[in-house]
Image: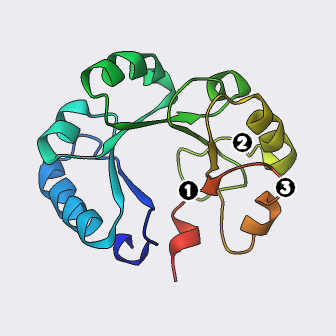
Amino acid sequence: MAESLPKGSAIVYRAFGAADAATVALRLKAIALRRGLKLMIGADEALAVEVGADGIHLPERLVSNAVRIRARHPTWLITAAAHSPRAARIQVDAVVVSAVFPSNSRSAGRPLGPLRLAQIVRQARSPVYALGGVSQSTAARLLATGVVGIAGVEVFRA
């Protein structure tokens, strides 16, 4: 799937402690370099350093680490997940708000819907990407919300 992303996109690799995390991340880094993509590592600063990632993606529960990470890695992109209006007001390079629509993801919460998403975007201090249930059939419903882009899995499947 990473091979088909448009230039300028970002891959977020969430290893979840996998034994082969460095191997997978290095493969993704090679794809990112070849295709003009960014590689973000989910919640693992050490792995991001090890593989020369472009930045880190923090879950909402770890967003307080953003200032400390920025101090150590001033050139990194730092993004964060947000599931509430309060969380979307954090200051990072971008916020990924979810779940917008019903999702097949086991971790997806109750969907916000486009109207609630638009309210969150207006309150956010960072650019907002929409995640959760975003597909070819739902993406058009995001046009008026103010999001700068979309994040997802299903939307990028051919």
Q: Give coordinates of residue 2: x percent, y percent.
A: 36, 69
Where 134 falls versus 35 (above or below)?
Answer: above
Mark 2 crowd level (few <14, some 14–19, many ≥20, 10 Å Cα): some
Q: Which residue is mark 1?
A: 151
The answer to whether the residues at label 3 and label 2 have Cβ atoms under 8 Å apart is no
Inspect the image, locate mark 3, and give the three-letter code of the amino acid beneath it: Ala
- Which tag, 3 or 2, sits closer to the chain's start? 2
Where 48 falls versus 144 (above or below)?
Answer: above
Q: Which residue is mark 2?
A: 110
Q: Give coordinates of residue 158: x percent, y percent.
A: 52, 83
Give the distance between the C-alpha atoms of the residues marked 2 and 1, in whole angstroms.
Answer: 17 Å
- Image check: 128 left or right of 79? right
Mark 1 crowd level (few <14, some 14–19, many ≥20, 10 Å Cα): many
Residue at 81% over, 43% down: 118
- Which tag, 1 or 3, sits closer to the chain's start? 3
Give the distance between the C-alpha atoms of the residues marked 1 and 3, in whole angstroms.
Answer: 16 Å
